[in-house]
Image (cartoon, helix red, strand yellow):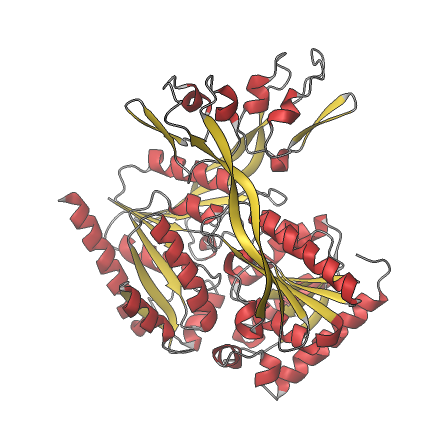
Amino acid sequence: MSDVVIASGKGGTGKTTLSTNLATLLAEEDPVVLVDLDVEEPNSGLFINGTEIAREIKYKMIPRWESDACTLCGLCQQVCNFHSIIKLGKEIMVFPQLCHSCFACSELCPTNCLPMVPMRMGQTTHFKLGNLVFVESRLDIGQEQAVPLIAQTKECVKKKYSSIGFKIYDAPPGTSCPVIEAAKDADFIILVTEPTPFGLNDLRLAVETMRELSKPIGIVINRHGIGNDEVDAYCAVENIPVLARLPNDRRAAQLYSRGERIYTQLPEFKKELEKVALHIRSLSEGGRQ
Amino acid sequence: MKEIVVISGKGGTGKTSITASFSILGTKDLVAVDCDVDAADMHILLKPDLGESQDFYSGEVASIDQTKCIACDKCAKVCRFNAIDREGVRYSVNTLNCEGCGYCARVCPVGAITNISQKVGVWYMSNTRGGFSMVHAKLGIGADNSGKLVAHVKNQAKALARRQGKKYVLVDGSPGIGCPVVSSLSGANYVVLVTEPTVSGIHDLKRVYELVKNFKIHAGCIVNKADINPEITEQIIVYLRAEGIDLLARLPYEENFTKAMVAGQTIVEFDNGMLKKNLTDTWQRVCRIVDEQQGES
């Protein structure tokens, strides 16, 4: 069993390229689940043309004010650390976008006037393509919190696909709460970067974040050959393995632009991708022993 | 004073390189802000002196005083975030899981739990070689509340622009459609969308523009790397027309974006050809559109 999370500090470095190509390559031999956790801008599905097998609406719980027995004591406003419930004159107003679903206002209300009710935040769709199961979660526009949807998606995948050995998660970019939620239960993290000053700056932040989580990491350098050698130098100094160097190639950019698989058409790319696949297989075997 | 926000939905489209170029072109008229606090990169091109800095606190994390805890389990029962760890009778807080809602502290019968305010980052008010001020921030590792930090740096920049009598606040926005980008957009007078003609570029452009529409902000779009896929570039242009978004520029796929970055320069300092001319025209056009708008930020 191995849960591999593919992340990056900087956006647009090739997380989705690596996730989709790697998952399909692994699926040529073994069952694989690919999960798109970049719920704000899910892109993996543009590269995987599977058949839809299931779809679920995802909800988060928010309080709903029932005025009948309310004494307007204001305790709900006092206990909410997120300012998502306020007393305004003779009314209690709820701001669902700010609510973290902690249930404090609801359960501490002395007159039970704030029952928790589900509110739609997005949806999760499951697809199948040969050996590959692809799960995509998509946050509704206007929803501000990605974390609850990421958490629910992980839970759903864990339950539904426990028998599948390889799980690849395409994480959101950055270093803040959505990435932590996506990465905190991983067995191994792959950080994708590009060999440029922006790539290196954001890679450093991503490495610090994953070290904070005490996760083993490997680096994949995308668009290798553009920019400079400082990412390689940094990885050597920090003693982080570089798993592969995907070549900088205009043809790869063009294939990506059309939503096509790259490794099936660019042998140089495939050769590097196979190194990543090999590493993941070795992790998985290590885990079984 | 008007606020111009540059966003992209998708990462890696050239947003920061373009924003930094605009700031050099508009130097005497603006204050620049990096609101991509998760992965702030604009300082690499603008190399600000790290001027005035301040810590930013937001949100809380629970902490259990072992000497007071009676292991009654009430905190663990109410916590919805699986943030109370138990080892026999020793209770502690898993700070990664804790959302800082404070529910546990309210139900603890012996007052053993306190909420500690979290330092989520540092923000700076700096000067750049262009002679303009820049407000930027560094988010702490794994920190929550990046939306609040975004709102904070933006407010600081607006106040500074007013004090300095500048015409524009130029914002390098955050990616995605969640709380940081909502904070980036709120109060904006004009949005510049930077996209690329890829299946994901157009997909993310449409999603983030749905959000921009909720704010009723007028927008323009730069199609970067336009020649990588002429067919999708055409699809983007049709979409822009249908939505009433200004087509600001079509830029070619250019390794000078990367070369300028390696040289620690903006594109308009590094490149003297078409790219510089294109970006200069685009910036002047954005200024004209914004200047003609009614109302202040």
| Vertical relation: A108 (above or below) B182 | above
What x and y, as percent, mark residue A48? 42, 54
| Vertical relation: A196 (above or below) A168 | below
- Along the horizontal axis of the image, is A284 left or right of B204? left
What x and y, as percent, mark residue A224? 37, 74
What x and y, as percent, mark residue B185? 68, 54
Q: Give A232 or B206, whichever is nearer the viewer.
A: A232
- Along the horizontal axis of the image, is A64 left or right of A101? right
What x and y, as percent, mark residue A9? 45, 59
**How many discs appear?**
0
Residue lying at the far front in this picture: please name it. Answer: B67
At 67% from the left and 84% from the top, the residue drawn is B277
At 40% from the left and 76% from the top, the residue drawn is A249
At 60% from the left and 70% from the top, the residue drawn is B233
Can you see residue B8? no
- Along the horizontal axis of the image, is A163 left or right of A91? left
At 49% from the left and 61% from the top, the residue drawn is A11
Residue lying at the far bottom in this picture: please name it. Answer: B272
Residue B173: image quadrant is bottom right
Which quadrant of the rendered structure holds the N terminus of chain A? top left
- Along the horizontal axis of the image, is A275 left or right of B98? left
Can you see residue A169? yes
Q: Give B251 or B117, whichever is nearer the viewer.
A: B117
Which quadrant of the rendered structure holds the C terminus of chain A? top left
Residue lying at the far left in this picture: please name it. Answer: A289
